Amino acid sequence: MRRWLVRPALYTGPMSSEQPSIFSRIIAREIPADIVHETDTLIAFRDINPQAALHLLVVPKTEAYRTVVELATGDPALLAELVALAQQLADTHADGDFRLLFNTGAGANQTVFHVHAHVLAGGLTEGSLAH
Ligand code: AMP
């Protein structure tokens, strides 16, 4: 009798859905991160490769928006919440002044396509903006 070999480890199913983003895995506590704040809709944690004395990422928990442009169109209230949380974090962890940065598109060096804001504070210099 002929028997089919089933190799479940290699089977990804028909039209397998996309993998959760690295940020969703942080939200799910599947991988560790230095989480500094969390609400029902947002999470903030330290960037693993800090570019300033304070470098936090503020991330909507939903993966529905890949870029800030999609977020602004799809849920402007959530974008406003994110901006308000950035101020709160800069108040708590720095002197209240901060740079808010959204890399948008691969050409701008966006590497994680789950919208997130970089909150940078402390020792920022004018000439460093584009580097
Ligand atoms: P972007 O290049 O704008 O998409 O930013 C992605 C950011 O995520 C980079 O600054 C990375 O250093 C940061 N990052 C990637 N993986 C992790 C992680 N596991 N924990 C914290 N930050 C991360």
Image (tube, rainbow, N blue to C red):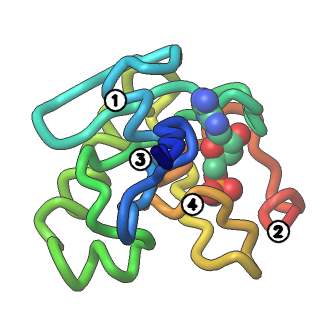
Question: Residue sitting at 32 percent across and 69 percent down?
Answer: 65
Tell me the element at label 3: loop
User: x, y (%) of residue 82?
Assistant: 28, 51
> Reading the chain from its start, which is encountered first: label 3 or label 2?
3
Say what amino acid the circle numbered 3 marks. Pro
Residue at the spot 37% in from the left edge and 43% down from the top edge? 86
Residue carrying label 3: 20
- Pointer 1 and pointer 2: residues touching (CB < 8 Å)? no
Relative to 69, say whether 80 is above or below. Answer: above
Q: Which residue is mark 1?
A: 27
Rendered location of residue 130, percent (x, y): 82, 68
Rounded to the nearest angstrom, the CA distance separating label 4 from label 2 is 11 Å
Q: Is residue 22 visible?
A: no
Frontmost of labels 1 and 2 is 1
Report x, y in % for residue 4. 48, 48
- Residue drawn at (25%, 40%), measured in percent from left and top? 42
